[in-house]
Amino acid sequence: MTLYEELSPKQKRSIRRDIELIISLKGLSFPKTIDEFKEIGFFPPSFKVKEREIYLSKDGQIALRRICDFIHQTKKYNDLLNYNDIFKVIIAEIERWINNKLIPDDAEFIEPLDLLLLKKIDNYTFFCRVEGILFENIDSIIIGKYEIKKYDPMLIFGINDANDLTNVIKKEYGEALVIIGTERGSKSVAQEKFYHNADLSLCVLGLYSCVLYDSAIRKLNIRLINNCAHAYGAASSFGWGNSERSLIFTRHFRSEQDMKIDQELMNYMSAECFFEMLSSLIGKEQNNDLENAILKSLFWIGEAQKDRSHASAWIKLWSSMECFFTLGDTEITELNAKGISSILLYGGYSHQEFGNYDQLKKKIKKYYKLRSKVVHRAEYTHIDAVLLDEFSFIAAWIIIAMASLLDRGYTTLSQVQKEAVRLDGLGKKSNNQIQPTRFTRG
């Protein structure tokens, strides 16, 4: 469907009137003084007409925004172009019509505009360095549509380098691990998608680190090296004791340890922990209710692992959990306690650490009260390392349990909540493992 066909008759009429207004004395402005610029704003949209700068009046700016809004809201360019992409193309097209001394109708304006917008869309492949992972006897990991591997200059062989950046890239990347992915859209939109999905891909690994390693929530720092990402070289702090006056020197590094990944670990994550299931959600275009909740939960557990503040990480872990169990506005603590406890104990996995159902529910309620201290009373010293390690382990296994429910055919959070209520009732009577109801895939 063309852009013109997608617009409603009312929108087409509005665009025709707005174009007529913009290319008129009412829509244009020719300010010469500071006061005249104040009237239209100091940075109004403008056009070049015979080397002269012409600006839009306030009415013209309103009309321009209305046209941009209509185009931005269409399905055709949703998730492919951002507002700025559309704004720039519309400005350029209006400038062309003004210079040609013509006023187009809606079809004459929209049809060539559609072609110009399409030219901004392409498939873009991006690379970004990754920190906090160490490969041992494996070459790469595939997570959804993305691949993590060691950087090789041959990966960019044949790419045109107008700015002579190849040597810069070679020096910065060396043999570092990189994540590689391809996204579609304008350059800025595709890059934003890449960063989002690359970050979610690393969240998958962060999730498994919390399952497999003690203190991973605090000691691992799996992340993209983009926007500097707080990356630094050598750093230190120093001081001394007032009594002995002897120097105390502490060297800081970018992360305390890396997550070592070998083939045995990959086999375990695939066989026992639904690695392929979780990976398949990254970059997936259409997701059901439960899949969306898992993606949000992955994001928050990843953000928690990046955070060096225990209290802040605690809040983010709870955000990860509330993606699944906080469906209403009442009995929030009880809903989370029932949901987390029942799914953790009876969701298809056996945990010796949390064998007593009633005790686990009490623990979750206590943990939620600790969250409230941070959120409502601004406390921040009451979350110690032991608490953070234990809750991160619980949160990680809940996400894996949700992947197992997804594999059984669950698609909605209401199904998960219904199952949690059922298992809660059975959990009060029995400590035996209870299998979740199997839903038909659909």
Image: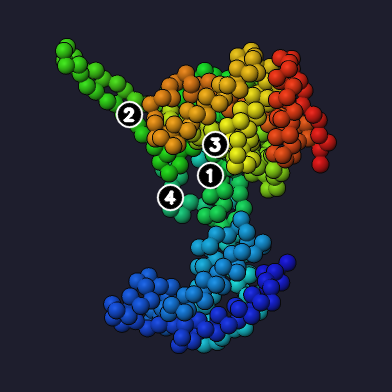
Residue at horizontal 16 percent and vertical 16 percent from the top: 242
Q: Are marks 4 and 2 in contact (CB under 8 Å)?
A: no
Determine whether 252 is above or below 160 in the image.
above
Residue 401, which numbered label?
A: none
Q: Mark 1 or mark 4, which has the lower sequence index? A: 4
Say whether marks 2 and 3 touch (CB < 8 Å): no
How far apart in space, not on screen, are marks 3 and 4 (Cα)? 44 Å
Asked whether disc 1 touches disc 4, contact meaning CB atoms under 8 Å apart, the reply is: no
| Element on which disc 3 rests | helix
Q: Give the labeled residue for mark 4.
A: 164
**Label 1–label 2 contact, CB within 8 A:** no
Note whether 201 is above or below 286 in the view shown: above
Which residue is disc 3 drawn over? 319
Where residue 26 appears, as percent x and y from the top left, is 46, 86
Q: CA distance from mark 1 to mark 4?
A: 24 Å
Label 2, on which residue?
234
N-terminal of the pair, mark 4 or mark 2, is: 4
Q: Earlier in the sequence, mark 3 or mark 1?
A: 1
Apparent side of residue 32 relative to residue 357 in the rendered image (left or right):
left
Residue 116: x and y in percent read 59, 69
The CA span between labels 3 and 1 is 21 Å
